[in-house]
Each structure stands twice: as structure tokens, then as C-alpha cells.
Image (tube, helix red, strand yellow):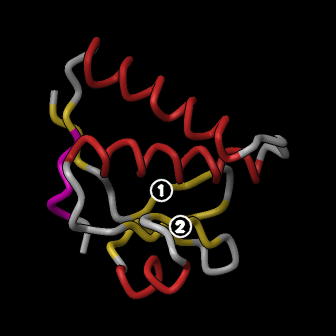
Amino acid sequence: MKVKIPRKIKMLTHPYTIKFDEKVTLSAGTIGLTRHYYQDICLTRELPPSELNQLFLHEVLHTIERHFNLKLEDQDVDRLSEGLCIFLFDNLGIEFVWDDIT
């Protein structure tokens, strides 16, 4: 089943824009970044699909962590996002489609 990644997601009442922005990620020394002040999730475009999908879920989990006042280490967020990937992609056959993200 194909699932199109939307340009915006909402976490509680907070809208986040999903975008590819290598300038932001490279300057932060990472491949993905959630910026709560700007309410955006910045990702590096040139990644293998499996890496991009896991990265997206990782950053979404950071929005959940913040707005539900959870205290998770980054390694915990990484393990949770990998687990979600196994469940969604390997077991449910979901495929993310990135066509709308610029």
C-alpha cells in the first residue's frame, strides 16, 4: 500500500512542514532535523529509500516526544523508528511516496 507523505503534519495543534533542506541538515551536521521553533522537519534528499523512511519516522517521533513531554534519548528514538519501519514496511507492505515533498 502506497502512502503519500504530506507536506504538513500536525502534532496536537502544532503544524510541521516536511521538506528536503540539505543546507539546514549539513549546517547542523546531520541528515535529518526537527526544528520546533520553525515547526519543520528537514531531511536530506539523497538517501536510500529505506534510510529516508526511517529518518522521517525518527523525526516524527521527536515531535511526539516534545509535545507529549516524553524524555527519550536519541538512541531510543532511533530504535523505535527502526521498529516502526519493520512493522510498517516489512509486515504491512506500506511504501512511502515522497512526490509532494520539495
In this rendering, would 5 be left or right of 17?
A: left
Mark 2 secondary-structure assignment: strand
In this rendering, would 9 be left or right of 51?
A: right
Magenta-drawn segment:
96-100
Which of the two marks, 2 or 1, is nearer to us in this view? 2
Point out the tag, 2 or 1, that comes first from the N-terminus: 1
Q: Is residue 3 above or below residue 90?
A: below
Tell me if residue 54 is in the magenta stretch. no
Q: Is residue 102 above or below residue 92?
A: below
Q: In the rendering, which numbered label is found on residue 33?
A: 2
Residue drawn at (67%, 58%) of the image? 13
Q: Which residue is mark 1?
A: 9
In this rendering, would 54 be left or right of 2?
A: right
Tags 2 and 1 in contact by the CB under 8 Å rule?
Answer: no
Question: Could you tell me residue 96's position as x and y percent?
Answer: 23, 42
Mark 1 secondary-structure assignment: strand
51 or 11: which is nearer to us? Answer: 51
Say which quarter of the image contains residue 101. bottom left
Question: Could you tell me residue 5's position as x and y percent?
Answer: 29, 51
27 or 34: which is nearer to us? Answer: 27
Which amino acid type is marked by label 1?
Ile
34 or 1: which is nearer to us? Answer: 34
Alpha-carbon neighbours of circle 2 within 10 Å: few (<14), some, or many (≥20)? many
Question: Could you tell me residue 70's position as x and y percent?
Answer: 82, 41
